[in-house]
Image (spheres, coloured by chain):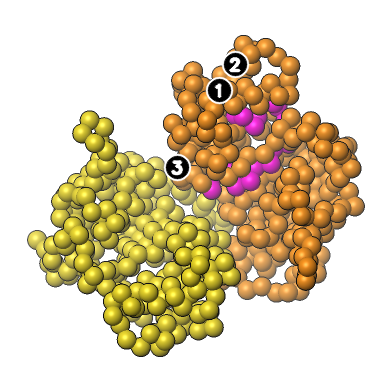
Amino acid sequence: MVTTDNIIETRGLSVTFGESTDTNRVVDDVSFHIRHGEAYGLIGESGCGKSTILRAIVGLNPDYDGEIFFQSQTVPHRRDKSFFRRMQMVFQDPYASLHPRKIVHQVLAEPLRIHGLDRHEERISDVLEAVGLGRDFRFRYPHELSGGQRQRVAIARALIIEPQVLLLDEPTSALDVSVQAEILNLLKKLRRERGLTYLLVTHDLAVVAHICERIGMMHCGKIIEELSADEVRGMRAVKDYTRDFLAASVGSRAGRIDQEMLPS
Amino acid sequence: MDKPLIDIRDLWIRFPGVHRSIDAVRGISLTIGREKVGIVGESGSGKSLTGRAILKLAPNSARITARRMDFDGIDLLAAPERKMRAIRGNRISMILQDPKFSLNPLMRIGNQIMEAYRLHHRVSIAEAKRRALAMLEAVHIRDPERVFMQLPHEVSGGMGQRIMIAMMLIPEPDLIIADEPTSALDVTVRRQVLSILDELVTRRGTGLMFISHDLNLVADFCDRVLVMYAGRIMEDMPARELHNAQHPYTRALLNSLPRLDHPVEELRVPSRDPAWLHEKVIERRENV
């Protein structure tokens, strides 16, 4: 049953691409829920459908079967403005997701204008402050910013209309480790301060365990298993595929240099 | 240690500008023998540029100076383009980040591999084909005959990168420069590609310069690690010593990674000290 605790819930969500004989079911009968204020992570190999779920939820993929609930209400396939007011998305590559010929101020003012919000200057200064940039950045073009600063602008753009949910599609995989640390800290801080709900898609286990409380393991369009962050850290998975995935992730990157895992 | 393959002393790469020049690489010295050397650093630290400078593929605007830049006794700085062409691919080859951009999209995979071989060896087409198929098998491609006839868009990223490795290894080079060879790949595929690269490099005794931003990956995979920051080498150490890294920058990079076995509320963000640009390299060799 749909309870009021759940901010997002999907039931039997399926997405199919292609025509009659040549179809490809990318998301296959996925049902999961995210509670208010929770951070939920989806992990899996590329092509397993994790980004497609994100796109279906946010409405970039209007052709899906099954139902998506937002705060216990079924959302229509064509989303309306009030929906986007409450849910925003941050994309993987900050180099591609900002308009190259718009200054930061224009980028941030557009959502305010669309949603008819007041006090533009004040809101823009506030949100830039919140993402750690400061208001002096208003008149810069994206090419005048570093990768980390651009991702901060992308986060600011999502936050400026004060949504309840942020959908994050690999928000740090295009960034250096030191910059990744900054952005992950920022995401944690913003969630704490504003009580946001996150849905994070990534293939980096350490990142997902750092940010999220619950994690869904995806394989071939299905969520095959749900784990808590502690279960991921302890490698306590039930399904063989999940165990292999966890082992592979730890094998090559491993935050475990202290242990004797290095070749001798 | 026998004679190093690459011997670089005091390499500077400068991009002259109208108002000010930018030094992308500032006086680095390194040697690479028949071993696996990892070069790690953030973007802009000059690691890729160093790799390209060895092949003299740096942008035309770059001014490259060095007291010495030798490859197996050949002075690369003085080598004319004609000589460089004989070295590139044949003796030093390069694996790039994304197979999508480095394979010719209009050429069948087999023909690309054969071309790589026939450019440097005078053999018949039949012989080249035989070798190309053997090479595809060596990179663990299950159905080499079928893949041989495929076009690059028909294979997955992991397979594409294995094809790149096959193509780069078939002329049997002495040194391979791998510039982020696995960062476009999934974790599950990454490991497989690395173990194949490792197997082939070790078996043939090829030198490997492995450029990456992933410290732990490099520590797992390489024999020696060089840490670069702002165009300088900060630290040079055996890979297994990485967890005992001395330099504050290396330590800071390690600490900035989220860790599975050690949850923290907030990650440490590296702070930078301008004095690092002038201090000496911390160098540790294994005592053998």
Q: Are marks 2 and 3 in contact (CB under 8 Å)?
A: no
Identify the residue position indicated by label 2 in the image. Answer: B129
Q: Which residue shows up at 67% across the image and 12% down it?
A: B124
The disc placed on residue B264 is none
Q: Is residue B176 visible?
A: yes
Q: Position of residue B4 (x, y in %)?
A: 82, 40
- The residue drawn where x is 58% and y is 70% is A144
| Same-chain status of marks 1 and 3 | yes
B139 vs A159: above or below:
above
Q: Are marks 2 and 1 in contact (CB under 8 Å)?
A: yes
Q: Secondary structure at mark 2?
A: helix
Residue range highlighted in magenta = B166-183
Q: Type of residue at label 2?
A: Lys
Q: Judging from the image, what is the letter of the chain drawn in orange?
A: B
Q: Is A48 inside the magenta-drawn segment?
A: no
Indicate left or right for A110 with A259 as reference.
Answer: left
Q: Gap in Å between the C-alphas at discs 2 and 1?
A: 8 Å
Q: Is residue B284 visible?
A: no
